[in-house]
Each structure stands twice: as structure tokens, then as C-alpha cells.
Amino acid sequence: MRPDQPTRSLSNRRQFLRRLGITSAVGYAAYLAHQVSPSPLSTNANGLLGQGRALWAAETSEATSESSGGYLKQSLKAGMIRAGKSDAANPWIERFRIAKDAGFEGVEPNTSPGMDVKAMVAASAETGLTIDGTVGGYHWGTTHTSPDAATRKKAQQLLEESLQQTADLGANTFLIVPGHGKDGTAEEVRQRAFEALDRAVPLAEKLGVKILIENVWNHFLYDHGGDEKQSAQPLADFVDSFNTSWIGVQFDLGNHWKYGDVAEWVKTLGHRIGKLDIKGFSREKGRFTDVTEGDIDWASVRKALAEIKFEGWVAAEVGGGDAERLKKIHGQIETALHCSKSLSQIKAETA
């Protein structure tokens, strides 16, 4: 970490637990549960759900014991869902129902100034589809690393609004692309990205929403013109530089197969991974594909996930469609990652 960067008391999850005198996931769940309101549903100023801490407590607690639901829960990006017809009063109900019927347990909508939070919360309650996280709907057009100060200020405002929307939805993670390598020199881009996310950490912690950086083709923390032997260490180091557990990675298992070994990236990022995204990629053809139609070695990825003991959410990010299309995608993810199996089963099959 550079001396000009502010430090925090939390360097990573393990150090965090040690500082609290906690030695197990059960203890961590109990700690988080103690931080939230004792009422079944905590509320914020908008009267909507903001249960990030409670969700982290529940999910961490679930991870301490084997579940019949499998080691991974499948989610998908909300924009993938296509509905032929729906209730004009709340079109999200039919869309969420389609995703739920296709086998998905969660959904990740894009944040935006016009997001209808109440409609999505109502649709989630009606269908049982969990809004597990959100995705930044602004970060490509309004970058945090822009050389223009006014643009960076606007991006910061949108980041804070997105965190609040995420909490209002009852979700506990916000996916972000922190900047673009073409916005300046490598040092300028890194520093601007650091300052933006670091400034948002207090709000993220207050709301119980983790900021998760996605590995994308943004010319940042990897060499876009490089070979396929690159490491995830620059991304790991960037996450560690914040010294807080409220910033991590939403690791896309397909995005950087062109540049590095997926399994090795999983092992390098380790505990920093909060959630997963998934798509396929063909090195031979040089393009993205459906999950099982590229040349990613999914067996090695499963083994790596077992090694880091990852349990949690994996979100589809491929071309969407109607109910039949979504069922196909759900099946492809199961084929690739064996989501319905327990972590001990995954470990056994990859031993």
C-alpha cells in the first residue's frame, strides 16, 4: 500500500475477525446479527428494506453447515428476463416469476435514478425471487476515473445513490466497474478509482452493502494487449489497499479467460470474492459464448472454488430471453459448476 493512501482498521476478513476476537463463521454471524435492529424487518428513511447486515449474518450462518440447496445459489441480471406480457401496474412481477420458474433464486437489477424500488420489492415478495445484489447502471458512461472533475463528482453521487437503492431493495452487494484504463495513466486511473471507492466505504458500511469490483475489459489492473498468462494479483492488491471488508470482488468466471487461467484467478482472489458472475468464452474463436459452449475448464474452476471454500451466489450474465431460454441457461450453469451439490461433494469429485 502506498503511504499516500488512507488506512483502515480492517485489512481483510481474517484480520477483521481476529480484531473482534471471533474465530469462526458462526461467531461472525452472531456479531453481524447484533449490529442490526432486533425487529424482523429493518427500515430506512424511505420505509423500505435495508437489511444488508442481516443478510450477511444469515448467509454466513448458512455457510457453516451443509445445505440441501447446494453450495451455489443461481442469480441472473434483471435485463436478461424477457416477458411476453405482464401487469402494467407492476411488470416486474411477471419477469421475476419467469426467472423463479426457470430455477433461479436471485436477481440483480441495474441501479438508476429512475429505478422503481417499491415495484421490485413488491415483485420479490410476490414471487419469492430474492434481490441479492445490484449492478451499477452508470459506471461505463460516467466513469470514476474520468480526467474531468465534474464527471467524477457526478459518478460519486451516482455511486452513493446506488448504494442507497441497493439497501432499499434489501440486497447486500453492489457491483461496480471502478474506472477505465483509457482515462489517464495507470497511476492516475488507479488513484482516482481508489479515491472514489474509499470515499464510499463509510456509507457502504452504514447500509450493510458490500462494494464488489467486477473484472471486466476496462484496461485496468491487467494488460488488455497481453497474453493469456496474466495474474489476478494486481486486482487482489487493489482490493487489499482499502483495508476494509466492505470492498471485494464480484468475480466473473468468463471475462478474463482470454487473459489468465480462471481457476488460478479464483485461488489468487480467494476470500476477496463476495459473489460470482458467469459466462462462457472461447479462446479459439476469441469471443464470449454461452456458459458451456466455450473452452473454459470448468472442472478446474470447481476445484478452485472448493479450495477457497466459496459458497454463495453466482449470477448469469449472458444473452437472455424467455422462460425456455432462461431454463437452458440455468441448466448450463448447473452443468458447469454443479451448483446443487454440497461443498463437500464438490471437494470429493475434484480431489
Image (cartoon, helix red, strand yellow):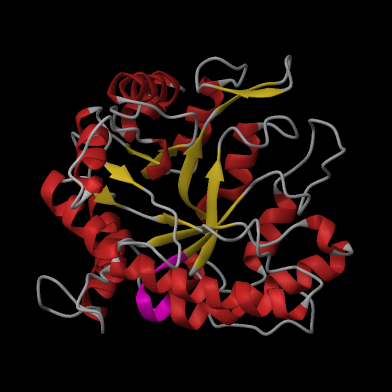
The number of callouts visible is 0
Q: Quadrant of residue 75?
A: top left
Q: Whole-percent x and y of residue 23?
A: 36, 66
Image quarter of the N terminus: bottom right
Say if residue 59 shows up in the picture: yes
Q: Is residue 141 left or right of residue 123?
A: right
Instruction: Judge left or right: residue 160 versus residue 152.
Output: left
Of residue 258 and residue 83, the one placed in the foreground of this image is 83
Q: Which residues are magenta?
A: 205-210
Is residue 207 part of the magenta span, yes or no?
Answer: yes
Q: Nearer the viewer, residue 264 or 351?
A: 264
Q: Is residue 216 left or right of residue 108?
A: right
Q: Residue at x 26, y 62 (%)?
A: 55
How far from the left and from the top, in percent, is residue 330?
34, 25
Instruction: Identify the residue at the far front of this view.
Output: 88
Query: Which x, y percent locates residue 2?
Result: 79, 77
Identity of the residue drawn at 64% across and 83% down: 7
Q: Give the vertical position of 72 relative to 154 (above or below).
A: above
As for residue 215 lying within the magenta part, the answer is no
Q: Quadrant of residue 129?
A: top left
Please report the residue visible at 27 percent of the width from the left and 29 percent of the height from the top.
84
Q: Residue at x 54, y 82 (%)?
A: 9
Q: Quadrant of residue 169?
A: bottom left
Q: Position of residue 142 (x, y in %)?
A: 65, 64
Do we see residue 195 in this rendering?
no
Classify 42 as above or below 27. below
Q: Which of the two residues, 21 or 129, is positioned nearer the viewer here?
A: 129
Image vertical order of residue 306 relative to residue 269, above or below? above
Q: Is residue 325 left or right of residue 264?
A: left
